[in-house]
Amino acid sequence: MTTFSNSWDNSIRAESYSSLEFPNTYFLAYRDLPEIIKKHCNGSIALDFGCGAGRSSRFLKNLGYEVVGIDIAQDMLAKAREFDPSGDYHHVSNGNYDLFSDESFDQIQSIFTFDNIPEMATRICILSSLVKKLKQNGKIIMLDSTPDIYFHEWSSFSTSDFPENKLASDGEIVKIVMTDVPDNRPVEDILWTHQHYLDLFESCGLTLEETYKPLGKPDEGIQWKSELEIAPWVIYVLKKK
Ligand SMILES: C[S@@+](CC[C@H](N)C(=O)[O-])C[C@H]1O[C@@H](n2cnc3c(N)ncnc32)[C@H](O)[C@@H]1O
């Protein structure tokens, strides 16, 4: 069995990723979030889990949130601090978020993080530890890749070199190339099905409030490939049971 390693935990990848804003398929991930957040979330204190080079944290700050970013990769955090020297970014290990008081966040955001996390037990440990830090009426916004992203061509990604992705089942490694950044070495992710996410949420005491799967629109000025018909991303809105 191939072992999974976090593709983001190196300086070349961090440098390459940090130049990304919201091009092409990424636009689709972030396009609807302001409306979704406005509809479902209250309060202004947020934790950005898997903040990477800080793009998602800066996005939330621009919506008026006070944001703390956490990540497992030091190289990504270094980039986040470079872009936002006054920002609050911390290195964490899996499931250990004790630097925060319980029930202290109105919102916990996780964008493209859980599709990098292998093993159901690890995922439950991480998500249930995060849930403890959420206020009783707080919300989790979790945005990840759909399995479809690994089987098609996209404005920001290619998977044509990896036909074996189609054979992957829940929890197995899949590969994808990012076409918007200089570093086009394949990124390894883990394929997780919708059913897996439902089981994960149940195990962590979460109720699924709403699921969104944004599609591209023909008049957005982007050369969409599969995005008009197939959703590359899924956005889960979650609350405590
Ligand atoms: C694809 S990047 C997304 C970064 C950011 N959320 C954004 O939208 O630009 C995924 C990030 O999740 C982080 N990550 C992966 N596994 C993690 C874990 N177990 N705990 C915390 N961060 C993790 C990676 O190091 C990486 O920085």
Image (tube, grey):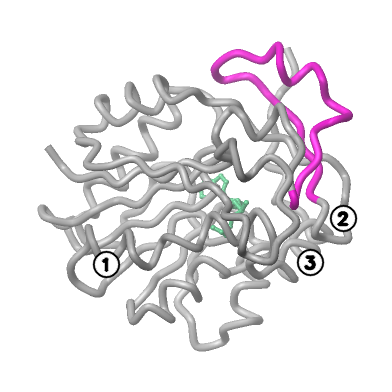
Instruction: Name the residue: 69% across, 59% down.
Output: 24
Q: Quadrant of the N terminus?
A: top right
Which amino acid is tagged 1?
Answer: Lys
Tell me the residue that label 2 is attached to: 183
What segment is highlighted magenta in the picture? 155-178
Q: Give the secondary structure at mark 3.
A: helix
Q: Which mark is residue 15?
A: 3
For marks 2 and 1, the one nearer the N-term is 1
For mark 1, what is the residue? 38
* 174 on left or right of 147: right
Q: Can residue 116 be seen by looking at this rendering? A: no
Q: Residue at x 18, y 56 (%)?
A: 138
Which x, y percent locates residue 30?
51, 61
- Determine whether 218 is above or below 215 in the image: below
Q: CA distance from mark 2 to mark 1?
A: 35 Å
**Marks 2 and 1 in Cβ contact (< 8 Å):** no
Look at label 2 and name its amino acid: Asp
- The amino acid marked with disc number 3 is Glu
Compared with 94, 51 (above or below) is below
Q: Residue furthest bottom?
A: 86
